[in-house]
Amino acid sequence: CICCAHMPASEPATVAAGGLALVAAIAVAATIALRDEQLRVSHLEHQLAALHAKLDDIHRAAPAEEDETPTLASPADPSPQSNASLLPHTTPTPSWLDASPVQPARILLAAVLLSVGWRVWQGVESCRAELTDFSQGGGRDGVATARLLDVITYRVEQWWAASPRAIPLTLLAVSCAAVLCGSWAFQAATACRWEEAIFNSWLFVADPAAHASIEGGAAAIFVGWVMTCLGLVIFGFIVSVTQDMMSSKVDSLRFGNSRIIEHHHTVVLGSSEALRPLISQLALANESEGGGTVVVLSDKMPMDELMRIVELPDERDLRGTETVVRHGSPLQAESLLKVSAPTAKSIVILADLDISADESDAKVMRTVVALSAFPKLAGHIVAEVRDVDNVENVRLVARHPIECVVANDTIGRMMINCARQPALASVLESLLGFEGDEFYLRAWPELVGRSFHSIFLEDTLAGAVPIGLRKRNGRILLIPGADEIIDDHDEVIVIAEDDNTYGPRATPLGPSATAGTRSGAKPSEEDNDDSEEDHSPRGHGLVGADRPQHYLFLGWRNDVADMVAYLDEIAPHSSTLTIAAQLPLDEREVQMMADGRHRRAGLKNLTLSHIVESVVSRHALETLPLLHCDAILILSDQGHSGDPTHADSLALAALMLTRDIQRRWCSDMSTALPPLAKGIPLELASDRRPRQTEAHPVEEVGGAPSSHWHALRQSHR
């Protein structure tokens, strides 16, 4: 039966081996039973013969006492009490079948040894056949030679590497072989029974102090010492293998190969630098609900590194939120099922920052297609797209509701707006996060049929300020008109502390009750006093100004073409933009063309010029008109390195140098300021190469008199 268990069921030899094993087992059992019965009968006959001999001796020794001579009980009525005194006190003949429970163990051991020997013989024959094929293929001409031992070693190593049970089974076989060999050696040294010898051999292997109490001579002591040393080695290997197996099992449980049984959780697909801040903000969002679960699925980095990213430095930053990590590809539906994506309340797809923008967006599209394999999702999808031109492509393949976030484009627009409106960055930082107040959207059936103007004036939503509507078709209306009616399934956009801190009032307030808070107090005469005009950019900003404005970009971004196009839409006519970076002009032109500039119309309000300079060199920055510009934007320079730490270092150095140069110019009125540089238009990049000393002085730019720059200098002081 053991042989059949080790042989393939498809081979005909399996059936023959099974039948042969069954016949052999029946024959062995019948032989044992017959031999046992014969030995018992022979032993009984021997006892009866001894009893009759004793009776004859009694008759000859005392003939006068015939009447008192004991007689043997009749076989028909045996009486143990009557025959007990007549039985001779002889030791029964020892038999190897006296201990009947030991015989099945010996038979089982023999069967196991035969099975193992059969399998080993098959393996050796298979290796011999492989060696023959190998010799016929390359070894015949002396190109490659091998021995049978080499083939066996190669196959054993393959078995150990492929099967997780190979090493434990090998240690088990070695241990059993050592115990068997030790039992035979100990039996030969002490002439004891084999069962006792195998038990002592196991004690020597398992207990290092067991050989100290051996009684049987020097040979037995030597066998015990050898078995003890061998047992130490074997158990050392067993402990090591067991520890590795348990460690791998614990790691697999920790890193996760099982399916996650969660609902109303957040799934993050992919990993990037934004993973840790994203988890921190999700923890803040889930704090009002008592915590939540964030599941991260990624195959981009090793699990231990991903675990270090997911685990925040301070456990209190999680605020009751649990983080779970699973290793798998977000492009496969099986891996998405592992993280219970269909039951998640939201699915966030992170962009891959290690590849190009188009490749990253293609990967996001493939992930969206994988999510479309599920007929229904409990939540919505938020996808990070790196190129704004690929947003429509991602929405095209989406089957479920999806929101596309173009982080680079959004940050670029925010930087331009913050440059045009001072202190706007603080407002956005306060709103675009879960600390303090933030934006929320919700549909309120109680407000259907009412106008947005009425719910704003009557302060219908307690604890929130309504700022707009999201219509059923997805259109966003910020501060809609007075006649805009809230329809069914329209969502009201509000600013509130949390999603559970606001709601419709039971009794709306009248317009008079909210006049002081909604309308605000009228400005006083002091507030309207604008007798002293402030030309400082920090005083009033650039929004609404009619005069031409002058902007300076220090550094380069991959999406700078989108920033230029957006600035051209909102800047006044005849404004200028100068981009100073170390990236050569030909590479700038290639990137701007790849970013879709050739599909856009020409610039209407801006005059674009380029300067090839290092933004971290004081000499280079001193040649730039740092005080003549209305706004200076320091970009994360990615022209030479994609390392974010290196880009941040360059931006910080440019900021410190720019501030120091402005401070020195403002403190020393005798210092001659460099004029606005025209730079080199991008269209002339193929005609001429830039020189670091090339600059074109300009008396007046965009119609702004020289007194304006003097006022700017005074305001900077």
Image (cartoon, rainbow, N blue to C red):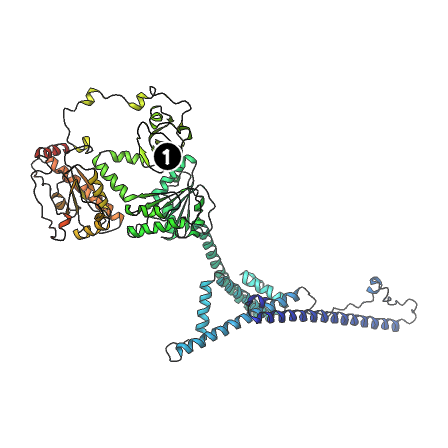
x then y, percent, for residue 552? 17, 41
- Residue 10, compared with residue 239, is above or below; it is below
Res 612 seen here: no
x then y, percent, for residue 274? 33, 45
x then y, percent, for residue 346? 40, 42
Res 409 seen here: yes
* Left or right: where 240 falls relative to 33: left
Q: Nearer the viewer, residue 151 or 540?
A: 540
Q: Nearer the viewer, residue 195 or 416?
A: 416
Mark 1 Cα within 10 Å, few/some/many (few <14, many 20+)? some
Residue 652: image quadrant is top left
Residue 532: image quadrant is top left
The quadrant of the image that shows the N terminus is bottom right
- Residue 250, compared with residue 8, is above or below; it is above
Callout 1 secondary element: strand
Q: Residue at x 32, y 27 (%)?
A: 483
Residue 648: image quadrant is top left
* Left or right: where 31 falls relative to 254: right
Kind of residue indicated by mark 1: Leu
x then y, percent, for residue 67? 93, 67
Q: Residue at x 79, y 68 (%)?
A: 88
Residue located beneath label 1 in the image: 441
Q: Residue furthest bottom?
A: 141
